[in-house]
Amino acid sequence: MQSHDRQMPIMEHLIELRNRLTWAVLALFITFAVCYYFVEDIYGFLVRPLADIMGPDRRMIYTALTEVFFTYVKVSFFAACFVSAPVFLGQLWAFVAPGLYKNERSAFMPFLCATPILFLMGGALVYYLIMPLAWKFFLSFEQAGGAANLAIQLEAKVGEYLSLVMKLIFAFGLCFQLPVLLTLMARAGIVTADGLARRRKYAIVIAFGFAAVLTPPDLISQVGLGIPIIILYEISIIMARLSERKRAKQAAESDDEDDSEDEEAEVGSSVATTDDNVDEQGAAAASYDDGQTSLTRSTDEDDAPKLSGPSNNDDGEDDFNNAR
């Protein structure tokens, strides 16, 4: 029975986790079905930056029979993950929040809300700024044919274009989570604002190296991702410093509360000691009064005249008779 009692909370947590994951997966499937219904519109939205540069008379191709179908499936799943992300984060929060204290819930809630917003900002940056500049750079290598050479013209494949767009959006979205990650690490005491500031030069090198790996091999995309990472790193330093100040303020307030409690405890103990001394003095005074009263009573009894019975002065009367 004791072993069963110990396992019950774990089973309840696992059942709760299963229910939360079920709702998250169900939301993903529902949004996937809806996105697949509008997949042509979604894919047209992703292709628009390239279509605006190439013009309406250009085309995209596919070289495998199943390429367009699987491309549409990838587009639908990509859009479903993006749309159902708030549901997944909400289920995750509903599972984790009951095990947190009130101050911990209030501390994590802003970061949970900032995660999808920052990812959306990263995707918007790459879609509206980086992709048009990068596509213009790549299309600048086209050239018209002549007598001495052949024409060079882009025939973009459907699957390759989608893979490139998804790679860019995920790269920028994940890089925009840097303030959330570093601020949480600062709250946990893993990193400090001064330490991040001292390692700024290493962070710049790592940022541009990371941008070179995730982006296409062109200067525009690398700089377009590297500069936002550096800006987000500086924002993370500011957020970490604010978090440290807030934590120090809370620690000072808790120390003041502990000192006030200790002072109250000392005052209570001194009052209790004073009461005990007063009680002891009262008991001593009462015992002294009882002694005086008994002594007075004994004296009054000795001075009272006795009419008969033996006397304490019998020996004195015999001496007086003999002397006479």
Image: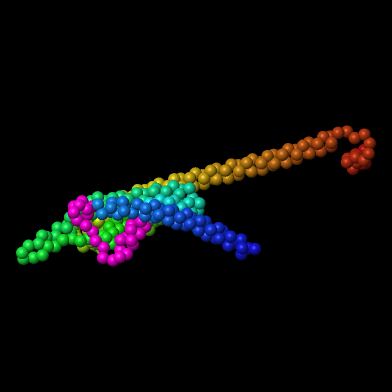
- Which quarter of the figure has residue 88? bottom left
Is 35 or 285 nearer to us in this picture?
A: 35
Residue 263: where, in percent of width, then height? Answer: 51, 44
- The magenta-colored residue range is 49-78
Quarter of the rendering occupied by the C terminus: top right
Q: What residue is shown at x 61% (from left), y 64% (from top)? A: 3
Q: Is residue 310 left or right of residue 41?
A: right
Asked whether 53 falls inside the magenta stretch, the response is yes
In this view, the residue farthest toward the front is: 65
Q: What residue is shown at x 52% (from left), y 45% (from top)? A: 261
Main SS class of the magenta portion in the image? helix
Where 180 sits versus 306, above or below? below
Is 166 or 297 nearer to us in this picture?
A: 166
Color encoding of the figure: rainbow
Residue 42: where, in percent of width, then height? Answer: 31, 52
Residue 100: where, in percent of width, then height? Answer: 48, 52
Q: What residue is shown at x 90% (from left), y 35% (from top)? A: 306
Asked whether 57 falls inside the magenta stretch, the response is yes
Quarter of the rendering occupied by the N terminus: bottom right
Where 285 sits versus 65, above or below? above
Q: Is residue 152 left or right of residue 305?
A: left
Is 166 or 228 nearer to us in this picture?
A: 166
* Residue 34 visible in the current orientation: yes
Q: What residue is shown at x 18% (from left), y 59% (from top)? A: 138
